[in-house]
Image: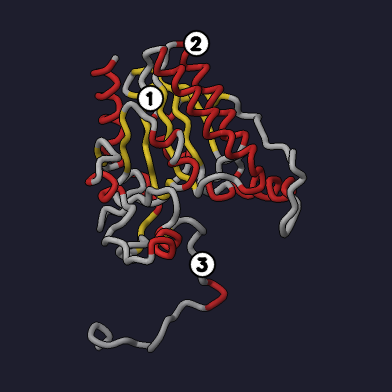
């Protein structure tokens, strides 16, 4: 009987009639390796529903999570890097910029916007790792500086979401100058009595960690994020010792006093909004 046995072995669908799943519909959790449906990821704020791993996301996703109804006004959206050093490696720097802009749809590695979070006005600046590794160049520093000026002018709290491989080598000293520039602007924000919230995500390294990413009135991080200045391999080769288990994870950094707390992305909006109400 056909109820209990197959009429034909193998797949009966003709090859010409097979349909491929659209790109981006599924991906795999890098921790537990289980398949994740994109719609479920969106509903779960891009956190794996099986193991809790926080997937890497960019400004588009963070803004949709944090701003009420995903409504915001982007600030200084047209800024784009120049090539003051005429840098050339495997290709000219302007060509590298154009390729990254075309691939990501971004002007540079940071976007800033003004909107409401649980009814409270706030400016959020968010780094995008997909744009040249979230590297800190002159545009990143300028956008942060201008965002802080905007906050001071309009008496608004400021939140910065860091995700970066560090300074942008193609801009050399121009990149490193952003560390001092943004730190000085943050001192003005503090003098104005306005809150500054730092969120460190995976990864936050290099000159970003050594400057604005760790200067918040409150420093928080997502679970399992890599946080450090130099990478584990470089440190191990320098000190000639094995590193502790979990070295440079947000949990390790919290244990050693560099963070105030770790927050699950699904609770991030409410936690930050509550903090702003308490200090406001």
Q: Nearer the viewer, residue 39 or 248?
A: 248
Picture disc at residue 214: none
Image: 202 above or below 151: below
Q: Residues within 10 Å of mark 2 (few under 14, many from 20)?
A: few
Q: Nearer the viewer, residue 178 or 149?
A: 178
**Element carrying mark 1:** strand
Residue at image point 75% right, 53% down = 88
**Element carrying mark 2:** helix
Give the mark nearest the N terminus, 1 or 2. 2
Name the colouring of the figure.
Answer: secondary structure
Give the mark nearest the N terminus, 3 or 2. 3
Percent from the top left, x then y, of residue 97?
Answer: 68, 46
Residue at image point 51% right, 58% down = 23
Relative to 41, is 251 on the left or the right?
Answer: left
Percent from the top left, x then y, of residue 129?
Answer: 51, 47
Picture disc at residue 19: 3
Residue occupied by mark 1: 196
CA distance separating discs 3 and 1: 49 Å
Give the mark nearest the N terminus, 3 or 1. 3
Name the image quarter holding residue 139.
top right
> Count of labels shown?
3
Residue occupied by mark 2: 153
Q: Marks 2 and 1: in contact by CB < 8 Å? A: no
Q: Nearer the viewer, residue 21 or 46?
A: 46
CA distance separating discs 1 and 2: 15 Å
User: Which quarter of the image is occupied by the N terminus?
Assistant: bottom left
């Amino acid at each position: 009987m056909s109820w209990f046995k197959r009429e034909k072995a193998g797949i009966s669908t003709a090859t010409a009639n097979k349909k491929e799943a659209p790109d981006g519909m599924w991906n795999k959790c890098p921790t537990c390796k289980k398949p994740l449906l994109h719609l479920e990821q969106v509903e779960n704020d891009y956190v794996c529903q099986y193991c809790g791993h926080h997937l890497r996301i960019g400004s588009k996703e963070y803004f949709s999570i944090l701003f009420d109804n995903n409504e915001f006004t982007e600030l200084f959206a047209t800024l784009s890097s120049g090539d003051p050093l005429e840098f050339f490696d495997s290709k000219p720097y302007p060509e590298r910029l154009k390729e990254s802009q075309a691939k990501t749809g971004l002007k540079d590695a940071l976007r800033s916007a003004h909107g409401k979070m649980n009814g409270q006005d706030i400016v959020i600046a968010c780094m995008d790792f997909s744009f040249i590794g979230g590297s800190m160049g002159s545009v990143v520093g300028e956008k942060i500086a201008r965002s802080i000026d905007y906050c001071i002018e309009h008496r608004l709290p400021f939140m910065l979401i860091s995700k970066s491989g560090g300074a942008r080598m193609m801009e050399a000293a121009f990149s490193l100058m952003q560390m001092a520039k943004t730190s000085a602007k943050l001192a003005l924000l503090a003098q104005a009595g306005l809150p500054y919230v730092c969120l460190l995500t995976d990864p936050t390294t290099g000159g970003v960690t050594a400057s604005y990413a760790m200067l918040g009135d409150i420093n928080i991080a997502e679970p399992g994020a890599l946080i450090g200045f130099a990478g584990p391999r470089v440190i191990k080769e320098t000190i000639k010792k094995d590193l502790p288990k979990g070295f440079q994870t947000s949990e390790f950094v919290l244990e050693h006093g560099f963070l105030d707390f770790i927050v699950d992305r699904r609770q991030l909006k409410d936690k930050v909004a509550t903090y702003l109400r308490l200090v406001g």
